[in-house]
Amino acid sequence: MTPRHYTSVLDLTREETMEVLDRAARLRHEWHADHKVLKRLRGYTLAAIFEKPSLRTRVTFEAGMTQLGGHAIFLGPQDIQLGVRESIADVARNLSRWVQIIAARTFAHSTVTELAAWSRVPVINALSDLEHPCQALADFLTLQERFGQLQGLKLAYVGDGNNVAHSLLLMGALLGIDVAVAAPAGYAPRREILEQAQRLAERSGATISVTQEPREAVHGADAVYTDVWASMGQEHEAEQRRQIFASYRVTAELLAATGKPRTIFMHCLPAHRGEEVSAEVIDGPQSVVFEQAENRLHAQKALLLWLLGR
Ligand code: CP
Ligand code: NVA
């Protein structure tokens, strides 16, 4: 049987995504109540492949497997050297014989989809240059918990139209949440992602918009989200990007420009205080960044169970 994968937000339907989010909320509640380790994934192993550094994704996948009664094996850049020491297809076909699920953080998105194409077990995108769907799951869980429901919300994303922005756009459009992006010229989200989001939004009723003007994007927003200006692999562009993005910093003034007193500030982390966000905002009362980080754990536990049919 072909396994279900989560290489993109769009690998799950709206209903399936809501199912995972509801399960995540229950898992979060149960975990807070008694920290009980479940037995649902007893004997199950996750192979976690990382071509790039990670704090949150690595720890939440490993801790999540432990809390579900299973086990995770971390495979860093030096361990398997995907596509160098061995082809992606061979790595996928080997791992499929030993483990029940794979998560992969890669440079090229095609590495994740190629793993999935050859794998007999589910493959999860743990961040690629195109998408970060697990982050989006945790973020929409955070929104749902903060506001009680997702319907009627508006999320504004200010900064680089990157992997995180792409997954937020797709999930917003899928679930019917308005997403407005403000990015400098040349740094907007990719055209194919915007087209997919627009198509989904027509069905879900969401409004998707892109502007170069941060104040326009945040108007009426319930959440203002930003991410680093230079993603992993773009370090050599960091200085140039600091200049291009200088007027895209999320400050207290920009947060106030939403016109809503309850607007929350979101960031996937790691953050650079004084660059994409001021310290005052990220460390202030409207910031939910550590809620988002915690929710990575609950959202991914729910996703693991869903993909494994447990
Ligand atoms: N947000 C996120 O994915 O963090 P890491 O890069 O630390 O995993
Ligand atoms: N856009 C960032 C997200 C890190 C979690 C990156 O790809 O480095």
Image (tube, grey):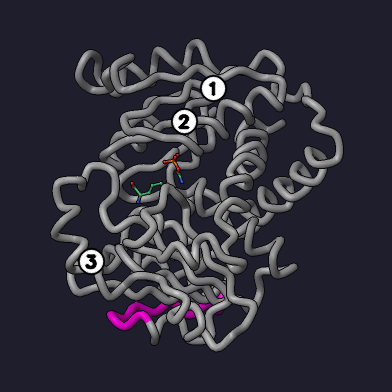
Residue 226, x across and y down, in percent: 41, 63
Q: Which residues are magenta?
A: 204-214
* C-alpha separation, residue under disc 2 versus residue under disc 3: 28 Å
Q: Which residue is mark 1?
A: 46
Q: Which mark is residue 103?
A: 2
Asked whether 208 falls inside the magenta stretch, the response is yes
Q: Tell which tag, 2 or 3, sits nearer the viewer.
A: 3
Question: From what the image shows, is residue 246 above or below residue 109?
Answer: below
* Mark 1 sits near ligand 1, with its Cβ under 8 Å away: no
Q: Tell which tag, 3 or 1, sits nearer the viewer.
A: 3
Q: Quadrant of residue 147?
A: bottom right
- Position of residue 61 in the picture relative to residue 10 (left or right): right
Quarter the C terminus occupies: top right
> Mark 2 belongs to which amino acid?
Ala
Marks 2 and 1: CB-CB under 8 Å? yes
Badge 2 element:
strand
Could you say which is closer to the camera, residue 272 or residue 170? Answer: 272
Around disc 2, counting alpha carbons within 10 Å, would you say few (fewer than 14), some (14 to 19), or many (20 or more)? Answer: many
Asked whether 206 falls inside the magenta stretch, the response is yes
> Mark 3 belongs to which amino acid?
Tyr
Question: From what the image shows, is residue 73 above or below residue 62?
Answer: above
- Position of residue 135 in the picture relative to residue 298 (left or right): left
